[in-house]
């Protein structure tokens, strides 16, 4: 099990110490690394971080970049410069931090409300996007790292299992990349989390992100919550992911949603860790 590094503490060294305290051996590095995002690190920053990590007998599992999460309407030149063009730097930092995964994000569209099929929109409107993802994945693989692509919110082009499958089919079988299923992100984009959704995503998955979330009586997520109080089948789904070995490391993320009046959010990260360890066999 791991968590996004800043969930443990805002200060990076304190965050690492808390990983040790909570017996979390792996790191998912994103923000809050000496006040910077992982892609903003200098070589000296990355070397310092790697030293602090090694001193605590921890290791990086994923570098969670924000690359490719941008409006496709900005065009190919923009994506080539601002996203594909920064993959080489991500690889340089990864050579110092030594993660398994370098994460990319699924792109978004400012026009997402105007169409139902994100991959069909890519095919018809921005076919160049697939080629840029292939190039990015190729650079990552050539450097000896694994690429993973995660679904996001706010106009994400991947909103359900069928779109994910179609997107990966467009990338092609020879492309060395896996899917990171962020359960709550896909829920917010309209797909309620279930074991059936997982089974469709299973062949493509390499990494699993989970967080809480509560409805207000229907299926739409409204409130932030712990995993224990979540409205989706947390234990059923997570147990199957662990049993199938589809995500050797699973990653807790902070819950989206509005604060629920009267709800106790005290120490919710530690509560989530303990909840999974207590209820899901095989989680360390």
Image (cartoon, helix red, strand yellow):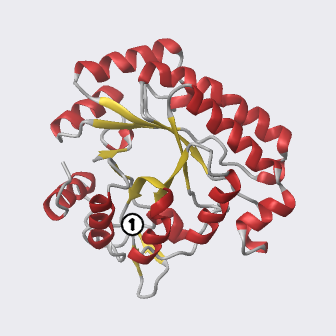
Q: Height in image: 257 above or below 15?
A: below
Left or right: 181, with 211 as reference point: right
Decide: few, some or many residues near mark 1? Use Cα within 10 Å; few <14, some 14-19, many ≥20.
many
Q: Height in image: 268 above or below 5?
A: below
Tell how many labels: 1
Q: Quadrant of residue 20?
A: top left
Q: Height in image: 29 above or below 184?
A: above
Q: Position of residue 129 (x, y in %)?
A: 77, 49
Q: Position of residue 24 (x, y in %)?
A: 23, 40
The residue lying furthest to the left in this view is 278
Dot 1 lies on which element?
loop
Residue 174 appears in the rendering: yes
Q: Residue at x 35, y 66 (%)?
A: 212
The residue lying furthest to the front in this view is 174
Q: Position of residue 97 (x, y in %)?
A: 42, 23
Residue 160 appears in the rendering: no
The residue lying furthest to the top in this view is 44
Left or right: 219, with 58 as reference point: right
Q: Nearer the viewer, residue 236 or 68?
A: 236
Q: Nearer the viewer, residue 53 or 204?
A: 204
The residue lying furthest to the bottom in this view is 217
Q: Nearer the viewer, residue 182 or 197?
A: 197
Q: Residue at x 53, y 69 (%)?
A: 188
Q: Position of residue 155 (x, y in %)?
A: 67, 62
Which residue lies under the disc numbered 1?
A: 224
Q: Residue at x 63, y 63 (%)?
A: 158
Q: Nearer the viewer, residue 167 or 56?
A: 167
């Amino acid at each position: 099990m791991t968590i996004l590094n800043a969930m443990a503490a805002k200060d990076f060294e304190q965050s690492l110490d808390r990983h040790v305290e909570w017996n979390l051996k792996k790191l998912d590095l994103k923000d809050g690394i000496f006040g910077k995002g992982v892609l903003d690190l200098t070589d000296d920053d990355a070397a310092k971080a790697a030293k602090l990590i090694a001193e605590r007998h921890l290791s990086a599992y994923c570098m969670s970049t924000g690359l490719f999460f941008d409006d496709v309407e900005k065009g190919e030149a923009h994506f080539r410069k601002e996203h594909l063009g920064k993959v080489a730097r991500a690889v340089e930092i990864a050579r110092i931090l030594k993660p398994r995964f370098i994460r990319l994000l699924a792109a978004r569209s400012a026009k997402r409300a105007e169409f139902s099929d994100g991959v069909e929109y890519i095919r018809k409107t921005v076919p160049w996007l697939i080629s840029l993802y292939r190039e990015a994945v190729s650079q990552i693989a050539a450097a000896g790292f694994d690429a993973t692509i995660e679904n996001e919110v706010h106009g994400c082009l991947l909103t359900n299992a069928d779109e994910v499958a179609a997107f990966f089919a467009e990338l092609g079988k020879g492309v060395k990349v896996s899917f990171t299923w962020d359960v709550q992100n896909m829920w917010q984009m309209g797909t309620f989390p279930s074991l059936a959704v997982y089974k469709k995503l299973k062949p493509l998955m390499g990494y699993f992100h989970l967080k809480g979330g509560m409805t207000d009586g229907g299926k739409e997520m409204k409130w932030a919550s712990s995993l224990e109080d979540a409205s989706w089948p947390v234990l059923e789904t997570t147990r199957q992911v662990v049993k199938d070995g589809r995500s050797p490391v699973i990653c807790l993320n902070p819950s989206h949603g509005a604060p629920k009046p009267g709800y106790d959010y005290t120490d919710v990260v530690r509560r989530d860790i303990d909840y999974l360890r207590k209820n899901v066999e095989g989680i360390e």
